[in-house]
Amino acid sequence: MQEQKYILKNQDSFNLKDIFECGQCFRWNIEKDGSYTGVFKGNVINIKKEGNNIIFNGVCEGKIQDVVEDYFDLKRDYKKIKSKLSKIDSNMEKSIKYGEGIRILNQDLWETIISFIISANNNIPRIKGIIERLSKKYGKKIIWGNKEYYAFPTAKELKNVTVEEYRKLGLGFRDVRLYETTQMILNKQVDLEKLQKEEDTQKVRQELLKLSGVGPKVADCILLFSTLKRFEVFPIDVWVRRVMNDLYIKNENENKVSKNEILSLANKKYGNLAGIAQQYLFYWRREA
């Protein structure tokens, strides 16, 4: 693979920290100069912002412009989305101003499934460490700039990995789940190609819930953050429960706020943009 460069000019709704620190991805790391380097779909790319320009530099499987446009969903009009959501209420408007550069990535479905199984009851540094060790041990090596990077391993590359071998990578209770899910996908008990083509979000969710280690919250993260791109889903974690209770529900005990109550409210307020609204609210509440 040859090194390639692409410059994106005057792109609004694109802020590196907002995109990579909002909880949707685990393989992007900040460099000393404030740029970010990431490994995705067999590509290694460094991104930095200079004035109004965003500079992409790296090695890709394909033309860098096409790779970037697909992964960062650059054809989608986030200005229009933000304008629509901002009109809902002042809380939404404030959260959008805080995370105005967020974009939901088109992440590989298989990688997103495994990454979010690993994320269960885990913290970001630990999740990133496990994924890095998994990739280094079983993924394809990519050399760029005299440095070694490792692509996320495919299901076939993990075919013969045992539970014990996963445990050695620090997966904890997730080792069995990773093993079982990999086998289910290899055996087509859950067919990822069919999932990509299925239009009914509920049917896709039910299929994802068959996978070991995939509960409702992980399923919703996969639906939102992968190439499945279901913007109507609203993943709920402790931060989202807190922000929805503080801003709208106002129950004295936030733990008594039910998931159904939050989902009903999110659906009513944000409709088919609920997932994007969730990212602005989550990022604002967690970071601000």
Image (cartoon, rainbow, N blue to C red):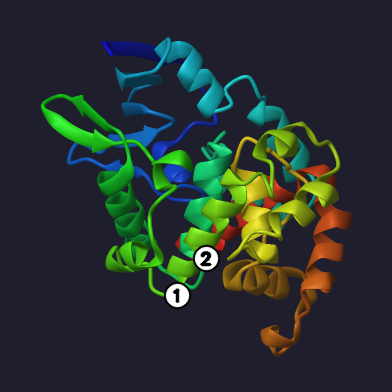
**Front residue (pair 143, 287):** 143
Image-based side of 284 in relation to 157, left or right: right
Q: What amino acid is labelled 2 in the image?
A: Arg
Q: Is residue 77 above or below residue 212?
A: above
Along the horizontal axis of the image, is 83 left or right of 28?
Answer: right
Which structural element holds mark 1? loop
Q: Position of residue 116 (x, y in %)?
A: 52, 57
Q: Residue furthest left?
A: 146
Q: Which mark is residue 173?
A: 1
Name which residue lies at 18% across and 34% down. Answer: 148
- Mark 2–mark 1 CB contact (< 8 Å): yes
On the image, numbered disc 2 is attached to which residue? 177
Residue 288 visible in the displayed image = no
Residue 79 against residue 224 in the figure, above or below: above
Q: Residues within 10 Å of mark 2 (few under 14, many from 20)?
A: many
Is 69 displayed left or right of 233 in the figure? Answer: left
The image shows a total of numbered marks equal to 2
* Residue 49 percent across, percent down from the top left: 34, 27
Task: Name the image quarter holding residue 3.
Answer: top left
Residue at (70, 89) in percent of width and height: 253
How many residues crowd around disc 1 within 10 Å: few (fewer than 14), some, or many (20 or more)?
some
* Of the pair 19 and 59, the residue shown nearer to us: 59
